[in-house]
Image (tube, rainbow, N blue to C red):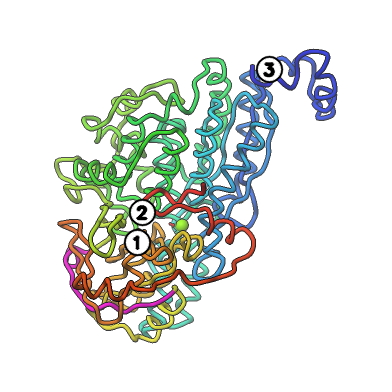
Amino acid sequence: MRSETVKRGYQRAPNRALLRALGITDREMEMPFIGIANAYNNIVPGHIHLRSISQKVQEGIAAAGGVPFEFGTIGICDGIAMGHEGMRYSLPSRENIADAIELMVEAHRFDGLVCLGTCDKIVPGMLMAAVRCNVPTIVVTGGAMLPGFAAGRELSLIDVFESVGRVAAGTMTEEDLGEIECAAMPGCGSCQGLYTANTMACVTEALGLSLPGCAAIPAVDAAKLRIARESGERVVGLVREDLRPRNILTPGSLSNAIRVDMALGGSTNTVLHLMAIALEAGIPLDLETFSAIGEETPHICHMMPGGPHSMLALYRAGGIPAVLKRLEHLLDDAPTVSGRSILEIAKNARIADPGVIRSTDAPVSPAGGLKIVRGTLAPDGAVVKCAAVPEAMWRHRGPARVFDGEDAAMNAILKREIAEGDVVVIRYEGPRGGPGMPEMLSPTSALMGLGYARVALVTDGRFSGGTRGPCIGHIAPEAAVGGPIAFVEDGDEIEIDLYEKRLDLCLDPQTLKERQKGWKPPERKIAGVLGRYARTVEQANHGAVQR
Ligand SMILES: CC(C)(O)[C@@H](O)C(=O)O
Ligand SMILES: [Mg+2]
């Protein structure tokens, strides 16, 4: 056992003395030590219930003959951090979480690990750590919030964001917005649609790193407590079998995860996170792989924000096992933490609602929900959730309206200075430029709420999983490193063609060269974590990982 390093032999008497100070008995000294990385805090709605889930994990570990040791990691609520300076800190928190878990697991020589987290950067950071440390690990995701309800319809956080645009347009009163604000978010769990947190939970299950069914169980459902208990029991089995994350995370399981993501129409952020996770395992994963799998995988679940279905609907329809069943003919067989292979799980699943989890013969769309686009504006690629783009906007050409930074764009949008047909360009918001590649749900939702039908938005920053409309993000190279997006001027024509997967700046190469002459990155002195991040972060097409 790995933990023997801290507990065997007379030289380790001091280490054991400290373990005894925790109440560890002689019998427990012989058992596997299991770390629980619990991202509980009481500022993130997705995390406020994690203590009770952790309790069940701990009971499961003890019942199976392990000793649970709980420690904390940070967790940021992207929704509370949205629309201001705070959002720059969100993506960097992913690396902090991965590092924090590595530090704890390595220092204390845990034999196994349970990762307990819910929201956008927490689950990816946990997966990175699991693969990096490569001790037997199970991930328990905290589950989605129930939908809110007001004026006869279900609500999610995105209704609140989009209603801001309605108030700006004068089509909604502030009083009505207040009613939605109070009704949309009825308790614990991640935001209700297939936004980033829930997409990452689904991807984790498809990777084989959560027990089957875990991702879609709502935060408040007792089934989550039961699967937490089972996960605690099972991690002790994984230690005994020596089944480790890198036995489970393989090119095959990564491809299954991307397929599930494509079939669901998941968040654009998964592209960054899956690349970062693959990198930890030393598995090459590039944008082309996403593109190729996207071409072969039909989009079969019309999930929010592009479609009507919430995570609760996906749960009731059969959850990820049912989605896997639909995709059975496309999956690579791969082991999972459950001890059953992914194909066994798929075969034994039941599709309870074929209206929510459609067959691949009658899909929402014949190709996957995400596309990788390239062109003269994005030579190294960009990402779009085509599942949430109305087909009328799959081809669009319009004049650029250029903004350095999100704030300037948001002001212009709310003042209705954008005209139908425009292509809003938000730059200097990339991994280095932000820094932190902020997610820009406020401007994309405002455009929706204001009722624009033919305005596109392109950026070197990121989007929320809740962003809908013709929004292309992750443009690489970003403006801060001199990518072509830095040289766009108001009125330049930008052409989008999602059928051909193109994003072009319609400018003759000579003019572009002229504009590039003498360009220097803007000089800025940034202190603290963001300064460090800006110096070491890679471009979005390499997962925006920190080196
Ligand atoms: C606030 C949200 C909806 O969680 C967003 O941050 C996302 O990425 O989905
Ligand atoms: Mg987010």
- Asked whether 341 or 382 is in front, the reply is 382
Q: Circle 1 is placed at which residue position?
A: 473
Q: Circle 2 is placed at which residue position?
A: 268
Q: Are marks 1 and 2 in contact (CB under 8 Å)?
A: yes
Which class describes the residues within 10 Å of circle 3: few (<14), some (14-19), or many (20+)? Answer: some
At 54% from the left and 19% from the top, the residue drawn is: 237
* In this rendering, position of residue 445 left or right of residue 325: right
Measuring from the top left, give residue 295's x and y in whole percent: 19, 45
Q: Secondary structure at mark 1?
A: strand
Q: Secondary structure at mark 3?
A: loop
Q: Quadrant of residue 290?
A: top left
| Residue 331 versus residue 300 in the image, above or below | above
Q: Which residues are magenta?
A: 390-404
Camera-side mark, 1 or 3: 1
Image quadrant of ligand 1 equals bottom left
Q: Circle 3 is placed at which residue position?
A: 31
> Is there any visible trace of residue 307 in the rendered image?
no
- Asked whether 138 or 376 is in front, the reply is 376
Q: Amino acid at mark 2?
A: Thr
Q: Are marks 1 and 3 in contact (CB under 8 Å)?
A: no
Q: Please give the count of numbered marks on the rendered protein.
A: 3
Q: Quadrant of residue 152?
A: bottom left
- Asked whether 184 or 467 is in front, the reply is 467
Q: Amino acid at mark 3?
A: Met
**Label located before the other in sequence (2 or 3):** 3
Q: Main secondary structure of the magenta part?
A: strand
At 31% from the left and 53% from the top, the residue drawn is: 303
Q: Secondary structure at mark 2?
A: loop
Which class describes the residues within 10 Å of circle 2: few (<14), some (14-19), or many (20+)? Answer: many
Label 1, label 2: how far apart the Cα atoms are: 8 Å
